[in-house]
Amino acid sequence: MKKMNSFNLKKHVPTKQNSFVYLNALFLLYLLIIGKVDPLTIVTAYFLETAIVGVVYVFKMYTIISFGNKKEKNPSYSNYSLILFFIVHFSFFIAIQLIFVFAFLTITDNNIKEAFNILENIKYVLTYKGITFVLISITAYNFADYVFNFIIPKKYETSSLNKIFTEPYIRIFVQQFTVIVSGFFIVFSSGITVVAIILIIFRTLIEIYFIANPTNNILDGNEKPII
């Protein structure tokens, strides 16, 4: 049985590796408290973050293939077509998620079109109060994580494409589950600000955990071939 490490507070306090996570949370809390965004805007933005995460992982895969461990001899690892395969694969994943999201949002927003009308619905939710600021903040956070916790420590030299390929699906499931649970409270209670605050805090704690435990977290497991 794998021994679990004890909680190390020093790994979770603000550092160069995780400061952008705290800054993102503080910025979102500030926007929410001063009324620049609505609770539903936070929930919607977190759902849309899936696409941002996908873009970041495309960059990670490109970095590994281009500058990673040259000892990898498997042709599938050195073939840039793998990136295209991931983009198509992940796009289907995003589309399915968005259909569920828009069906979910129809509960509280009558302006949401048919759930399968993805492009029109995306165009509409991008008009939500303050969502541009929230998405910019989330995008900056995700790319900061890519730079400070992947590029600078040169993790691309030891990272496996197997793990990078599958990691976003599992991680997004863990993150989005918390968003869905909180979203139900916000939707059915006509927008509770305190729930949105708890959601931001809880999501931040999840991100801090992943950064503090890059090689020993709940996502780790036996790697399997991509294709």
Image (cartoon, grey):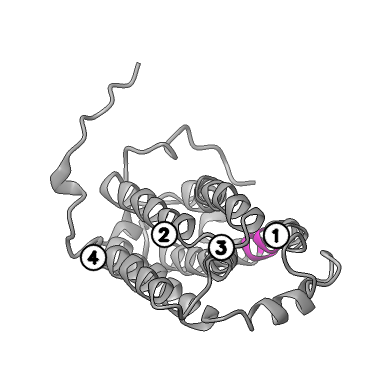
The reply to whether the C-beta atoms of the residues labelled 2 and 4 are less than 8 Å apart is no
- Regarding mark 3 in the picture, which secondary structure is present there? helix
The reply to whether the C-beta atoms of the residues labelled 1 and 2 are less than 8 Å apart is no
Q: Is residue 14 left or right of residue 151?
A: left
Location of mark 2 (residue): 197
The disc placed on residue 101 is 1
The disc placed on residue 145 is none
Amino acid beneath label 3? Val
Location of mark 4 (residue): 19
Where is residue 192? Give x, y as percent.
52, 59
- Regarding mark 4 in the picture, which secondary structure is present there? helix
- For the stretch drawn in magenta, the main secondary structure is helix
Front tag of 4 and 3: 3
Report the front residue among 225 and 39. 39
Residue drawn at the location 36% of the way across and 38% of the way down: 217
Amino acid beneath label 2? Ile
Write the start and end of the magenta stretch as one range: 85-92
The disc placed on residue 43 is 3
- Regarding mark 1 in the picture, which secondary structure is present there? helix
Is 175 placed above or below 92 here? above
Taking the magenta stretch, the answer to whether it contains residue 91 is yes
Residue drawn at the location 17% of the way across and 61% of the way down: 15
- The residue at the far left in this view is 10
Front tag of 4 and 1: 1
Where is residue 164? Give x, y as percent.
48, 53
The span from disc 1 to disc 3 (Cα, nearest Å) is 10 Å
> Between disc 4 and disc 1, whose residue precedes?
4
The span from disc 2 to disc 3 (Cα, nearest Å) is 11 Å
> Between disc 1 and disc 3, whose residue precedes?
3
